Amino acid sequence: MKLEICTWPDDVLAGKAQPLTEVTPEIKKLIEDMVETMYEGDGVGLAAPQVGEPIRLICVDQTGPKLRGDLRVLINPEIIECDGEVESDEGCLSCPEFSATVLRKERVKVKALDPEGAEICLDADGFLAIVLQHEIDHLDGITIADRAGRLKKALYRKKAMRWKA
Ligand code: NI
């Protein structure tokens, strides 16, 4: 089932998401729906707060909705090492009609649990590293609108508030 995507500046996007302690049947269904919503929305990543669930759960597929060749579902993901810096032009399903250039780490090592509860450690660089940082940002209440410059953010807020009115 495709879920509704919350858009900035919704409150659920601004809070710190809570760690997930158990993968219940409800969470399994949520994961399935998130993956579908990500692909249907033409996205390469989705975080649970974007569908209104303030928990630390993300899905990513750097190959996109056409190939669907590298799906990863990460629970309680944590960046434990990083290095290098790179500028990245990003969009976000929660920030329609908006893009921003964001400073990211070039490489990240991410520790997480998979849906079966197994610990995984991911060494990522290139596009995957960027997607992971973008989605983990969502778990900490940060969107690309928040990472944009002050003026750009203010103008986008005005536009976004008009859509919500
Ligand atoms: Ni996003």
Image (cartoon, helix red, strand yellow):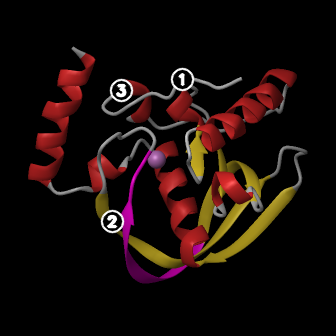
Region rendered in magenta: 81-92
Residue at position x 26%, y 18% in the image: 164
Taking the view exactly as shown, the residue that stands out farthest to the bottom is 84
Residue 147 position, x and y percent, is: 29, 55
Q: Earlier in the sequence, mark 3 or mark 2?
A: 3
Q: Earlier in the sequence, mark 3 or mark 1?
A: 1
Measure how far apart labels 2 and 1 are at the Cα level: 26 Å
Name which quarter of the figure residue 62 lies in: bottom right
Q: Nearer the viewer, residue 103 or 109?
A: 103
Image quarter of the C terminus: top left
Residue at position x 29%, y 59% in the image: 100
Residue 71 position, x and y percent, is: 75, 55
131 on left or right of 110: left
62 on left or right of 97: right
Residue at position x 47%, y 38% in the image: 16
Disc 3 element: loop
Q: Nearer the viewer, residue 38 or 10?
A: 38
For mark 3, what is the residue? 10
For mark 1, what is the residue? 4
Disc 2 element: strand
For mark 2, what is the residue? 102
Q: In this picture, is 58 found above or below 28?
A: below
